[in-house]
Amino acid sequence: MKVLAQLLVNGLIAGSMYALAAIGYAMVYSILKFANFANGSVAMVGAYLTFVLCTRLGINVVLAFVLSMLISAFLGVVIDKVAYKPLRQAPKISVLITALALSFILDASVLLIMGAEFKRFPFPIVKGLRLGMVFITPVQVICIATSLFFMLSLHFLLTRTRIGKIIRAVADNPELAAINGLNTDNVISIVFAIGSALAAAAGTLIGMDSVISPAMGFVITIKGFAACVLGGMGSINGAILGSLIMGMVENLGTWFLAGGDARWKTTFAYIVLMLILLIKPAGIFGRKGEARVF
Amino acid sequence: MLKIDNLTKNFGGLRAVDHCSFEVPRGAIYGLIGPNGAGKTTMFNLITGLLKPDEGHVFFNGDPITGLSPYQIAQRGIGRTFQIVRLFSNMTVMENMLLGPRNQYGENPLFALLNPSRVTMQQIKNEKKALKLLEVLGISHLRDAYVKELSYAEQKLVELGRVLMMDPQLILLDEPTAGINPTFANKILNYIRELRDKEGKTFIIVEHNMRVVMNLCERIIVLNYGRKIAEGTPEQIANDPRVIEAYLGV
Amino acid sequence: MLPTGVIIHVLIVICIYAILAIGLNIIMGCAALFTIANAALFGVGAYTSALLALAGFPFWLDILAATFMAGLISFLIGLPTLNLVGDYLAVATMGLGEILVAISRNWDSVTRGPMGLPGIPPASLFGFTFDSPPKFLGLSAALLLVIYLVAERLIYSPFGRVLKGIREDEIAVQALGKNAFWFKMWAFVVGGAFMGTAGSLYAHYLGFIDPSSFTLWIAFFIWSIIILGGLGNNLGAIAASFVFVAMRESLRFLGLPANVTAAIQQIFFGIILIVMMIFAPRGLIPERKYITRYKGDAEDRQSD
């Protein structure tokens, strides 16, 4: 029972971090109708940026975190302008191939620059805190608190501010929004900026909780995508819910089915993804008819 | 030949087809008219299996075909054209035509590999047939052109040719003369009549051009807001107050 | 000038990738089924062949088994996925492919996991053993020719035409009475089977295989070959295999450590692919145009 509770809590914490990356997917999908496979790699870049700023340049970790988010936001916008924008009218598969190619390029570039070895944030090892039945480390507390903060901020942005309403309008019906005079290009850039910044946050938090490596980009991509499909592609709430479920599934699955071997975590993401695509491709909050031919 | 019984289709809160029933006998040319959004194309989609009805049945030659998949329904001999042309744009006109005939020997990859001479023989036969059709339609000079290079009217003709290559018994035409000049449209209409007279083919035609409908169709079904509001001969329909109101009231 | 040994090695690898590319061309070039499982099927062929050869079975048997196994697994992968649209199909096949790779990495008892299978005996047919690279090149080129001819006949047959129709507009194809799912499945199985054949050749050439040769990156590399060569064009695929494999092998000669070379490849080919997507998404060489064969006389036509 104690083990179960611990696994669930670990799952929720992991899920909340994936959620930040998954939100980026959901937002881009809701407007442009494609899955931005490069998002996980942007998350990884964000993690490395925070690491480098903080350890090599001696910048305060919180400031490094914020800077990394800003730089990643910029990176996301550049990626869109250079690689995705020329393909707006092309079949969806072209932009999918481009996104995959970008993820390979980003992963490989970081590997060349930073090397393939795992890196850790130089936090002091502190004893875990006891919260009822479960243990939770201070880093994990920070992670979940930060994730919650960003999710709530995003919610506030989308529901209470003017720019948020504009974003939702464009996501709901891009053609109508354009006709009504909204500058869809700018909105798209803002969405990429927000999504990439959140991805960088996700990458950094995940890196703080465990390790940073160039390979983590693709892992985040797959888990983020699976979470979105599970929750319903294009729905932010779906992305969050899907991520939390994914986090719990991977922890429970690894423990009970794979003897705790962490290498299987990503495989569980794939299995969840496959099951959803086969049973109900529209996901929990998704609309029918987008995934299947008929 | 075709019997529609109490057919209903809802899209969320909207009832696109509302408990419609009618029958089309063999060798008839029927018209299906109504204001925009009346449910005519939805009706075609329901008959051809692209949509599944929420209520009701479709019978073809006495057999129920409700709920069958589109290719199964087409296999039974129901062909259709689309309101917005659905051609294979990056293929030539002839290739489009050659995709019409059903159950080609060479469509099975094993046969295509192991018995190429028989495949070629059938292919030549089909090409001959296609050429004849293209001549009747006046576009045989375009046979090796890519469809995407054709004008809209030419494309509509190719789509008609392709569905005729299928040799269907029942043909659903969705606005066959839209965008085609009147003289040519007449030629097509005469050809439709000829196909019915000489080969016993049955047609249901969705059209907005009233002159075409009145001249060509022996019986007309009128839809409005998904419901059948009138059925009868062209004279009856022309004088039916409900029909007049439906068109004027929109 | 490069030593002959190097040239022959590169040519053999080109033949193997050309076979992979032709197989993928049937699936993705003609029918537009975006499958990322291709490298995994390459692996299925390689492992089947290797395991059978190590158990003492003759080459002709293990290459046929590899081809068959890859076709069978393609069928199983296709059953749940071929009704999915575009990017969903791609991701589903990616997932299934990765699951296959994970199996090869973790099923230690059979595949020896990351350590791979060494000591695969060389291929031999009718008593003649292909134990030197020039002999193997002859075998590979011969197989490539056979597969090329088979693929060409399929692509330019009514079967191939339906596949292209599915690529253009699947609903229209259905409206013409053709069961699109069946056609897609055939394309998937035949293409997959060819990838298995390539896998068998690969296993017998190197004498050693491990999971790292069948990763997602390789799947992507094969995609880039057919995209460069022109979707649906097999001669283009062979030409593009030549160019890309030669580029890739020449990068190895810089003598850099393995993961650095791999990273440079990914960046290089990734950029090429993005440029191609923006400027020439259907590839550099277009498909051959179909010209009506029947030229009959006017009298001949009127007499019908």
Image (tube, rainbow, N blue to C red):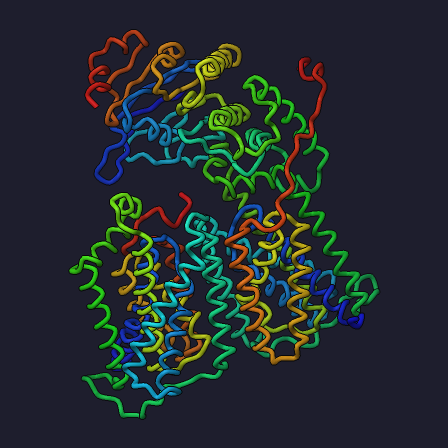
Image location of residue C239, percent across then percent down:
68, 55
Please give left or right for residue A185 compared with residue B111 in the image.
left
Query: Is residue A15 in view from this perspective?
Result: yes
Q: Residue at x 25, y 23 (%)?
A: B224
Outermost residue, top direction?
B235
Judged left or right of residue C158, residue A213 is: left
Name the quadrant containing residue A196: bottom left
Extreme-right residue of the structure: C127
Q: Nearer the viewer, residue B98 or A30?
A: A30
How many numbered circles does the render carry? 0
- Residue appearing at x 57%, y 49% in the figure: C29
Instruction: Note whether residue A230 is visible.
Output: no
The quadrant of the rendering that contains the C terminus of chain C is top right
Place of residue C274 in the rendered image (x, y in percent of width and height, measured from the top left)? 51, 59
- Provide residue A141's location: percent of width, then percent of height: 24, 81
Residue B27: % across, % down: 44, 13
Above-or-below relation of C158 to A114: above
Front-most of residues C26 and A64: A64
- Seen in the picture, residue A98 relative to B93 is either above or below; the reply is below
Please state which of residues C68 and B121 is positioned toward the viewer in this rendering.
B121
Where does the N terminus of chain C fall, quadrant-wise?
A: bottom right
Q: Quadrant of residue A228?
A: bottom left
Q: Is residue B84 above or below residue A185?
A: above
Question: Which residue does the image show at 34% across and 68% down from the upper left?
Answer: A73
Residue depicted at x 61% and y 47%: C232
Q: Is residue C51 left or right of residue A27?
A: right
Question: Seen in the image, is B191 located left or right of residue C16?
Answer: left
